[in-house]
Image: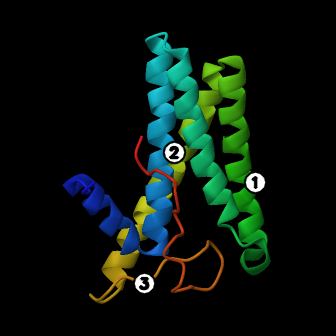
Amino acid sequence: MAASPRDNYLSTEVRTATPQKLQLLLIDAALRSANRARQLWAQERDDLAILSLVHAQSVLGQMLAAIDRDAGGDLATRVSAVYEFIFRSLVKAGHRHDEQSLADATQILEIERETWRQLCEQITTDRPAGPAAPHARFGAPVDAEADDFVGGLSLEA
């Protein structure tokens, strides 16, 4: 089966993204899924809302797994704590249909998105034009062999 133009675009976007842009894409995916869950709850489609929350949790799990706590030191520990809080809030939201926990998670994700968006913008203006750097785990050295970083994780929701 041939890939759609949208799938080709997303694949190219991920494969050519800087590590910072990949982080932004993951945050966007988690946020879209969390917001979709809120919309589905409003439509009383709880089964689909749970699937959206599970997708957001999966994205957060990938973000957590990408953090190299040894190389990242204290910053990696603090970032991990933030992502673990978001993950727990998403779990609580789904388990208890807790809209406040969902709001807490999305509020922090929105702050993260803005932070990473600004970082990506700053890097773009500071770096001379050229090919994008291969992606890497947060806090780890760049690994050019890491083309399967996103694996089976869907960035869309």
**Where in the figure is residue 83, as x and y percent of width and height?**
67, 51
Q: Is residue 23 left or right of residue 129?
A: right
Residue positioned 52% across, 70% down in the render: 148
What is the spatial separation of the Cα atoms under label 1 and label 2, in whole angstroms?
A: 17 Å
Residue positioned 29% across, 55% down in the render: 7
Q: Amino acid at mark 2?
A: Ala
Q: Which residue is mark 1?
A: 81
Location of the C terminus by quadrant is top left
As drawn, the residue found furthest toward the front would be 1
Answer whether labels 1 and 2 touch (C-beta < 8 Å).
no
Q: Is residue 21 left or right of residue 153?
A: left
Q: Amino acid at mark 1?
A: Ala
As drawn, the residue found furthest toward the left would be 5
Disc number at residue 25?
Answer: none
- The quarter of the displayed image where residue 118 is located: bottom left
Location of the N terminus by quadrant is bottom left
Residue positioned 65% across, 18% down in the render: 97
What is the spatial separation of the Cα atoms under label 2 and label 3, in whole angstroms?
A: 24 Å
Q: Tag 2 or tag 1, which sits nearer the N-term?
A: 2
Q: Tag 1 or tag 3, which sits nearer the N-term?
A: 1
**Which is more toward the observer, 57 or 47?**
47
Disc number at residue 133?
Answer: 3
Q: Secondary structure at mark 1?
A: helix
Q: Is residue 109 left or right of residue 61?
A: left
Q: In this view of the protein, can residue 146 be seen by the observer?
A: yes
What is the spatial separation of the Cα atoms under label 3 and label 1, in whole angstroms?
A: 27 Å
